Image (cartoon, grey):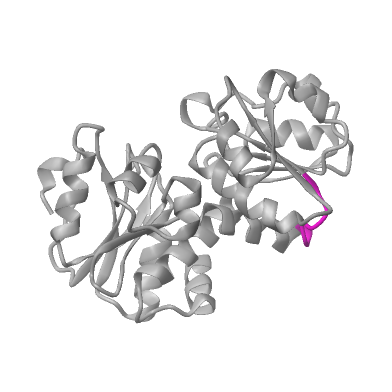
Amino acid sequence: MDISLIENQITIGGLDKYAAIIGKNPSNGARSPKLWNAAFNEYGLKCSMLPLDVTNDNILDLLNDLNQDVNFIGGAIAVPYKVVVAKWLNGNITTEARNIGAVNCLFRDKKGKLKGTNTDGEAALRSYESKYGSVAGKTVLVLGTGGAAKAVAAYFSAGVGKTGAVSIVGRRNHGIIFSKVLGVRWIDWEEIGQHLTDVDLIINCTTIGFEKQIKLTPLSIEQIQQLKKSTVVFDIIYQPEITVFQKLACERGVSAMGGLMMNLEQAVIAFNYANYQANDEIVTREAMQKS
């Protein structure tokens, strides 16, 4: 790998193989390396996951370089390159990722070519149902229209079935085409107040509450007060572990969960995609939970 293409300092020496999380600044606290490396140790593999910070100008060159490096087994794609990587893969992506238009996981296919998939939706649904039970029949609002939001909307739409309902909330018609393809309702963010009183689950898939927006919340205090006490708030952000949105929901008496469990499930699923010789989900999950 050409080290000059990344912004942070890393060392690859001594590894048989390596994985990576690729994003704007995953070296600034991304959890995936810790989880993946715990699993590599459990399986006795001389492999490591590395955080690669890359700029918009270098992302395509980095991807091309990694594609040619036989020691690179795959890994995770972080903000803001999920859509960029999906396009770069030029069709070599799973059906789920193709429908969503974004990937967050890279792995080698049987021919050794890099392939992409999206684990956001599956991981989100797993983590929600492990805590609250089946989503079938629920009324769900998905906040946001990016890659994660589309993945979550797709999986939860399948999960709620015909007796439930999923809506995507966006701004300036963003996500409206995808909502039509998926067969779910699209709601303009300015009209969200009209849809809060009867909702069973709200999933925040925006970056509101993360990094520079850490003090912000996607819904105002007044809007949160409209929620019925049985509503669940699911914020997929995991840094911070408890967001302002979750705090306000709990003050309202509404149950809330963050993105830590979803992040763990993403890592389990993605690790097993990239590691054909180490793909026991139970073993992987237990190793990662201990890290």
Number of numbered discs: 0
Please state, as top left, top right, bottom left or bottom right, where the N terminus lies in the image.
bottom left
Query: Image point 35% across, 81% down: which residue?
Result: 277
Residue 77 in the image, given as x and y percentages of width and height: 37, 49
Residue 250 left/right relative to 145: right
Q: Is residue 65 above or below residue 111?
A: above
Residue 80 visible, this angle: yes
Residue 291 visible, this angle: no
Rendering quarter of residue 229: top right
Residue 119 left/right relative to 88: right
**274 or 194: nearer the viewer:** 194
Residue 200 in the image, given as x and y percentages of width and height: 82, 44
Residue 193 in the image, given as x and y percentages of width and height: 79, 22
Q: Is residue 113 above or below residue 239?
A: below
**249 or 183: nearer the viewer:** 183
Residue 84 in the image, given as x and y percentages of width and height: 33, 40
Q: Is residue 88 above or below residue 204?
A: below
Rendering quarter of residue 93: bottom left
**206 or 13: nearer the viewer:** 206
SS majority, magenta: loop
Give the extent of the magenta segment: 132-139
Residue 44 lies within the magenta run: no
Query: Image point 35% across, 73% down: which residue?
Result: 275
Query: Image point 19% across, 37% down: which residue?
Result: 58
Query: Image point 53% across, 66% down: which residue?
Result: 289
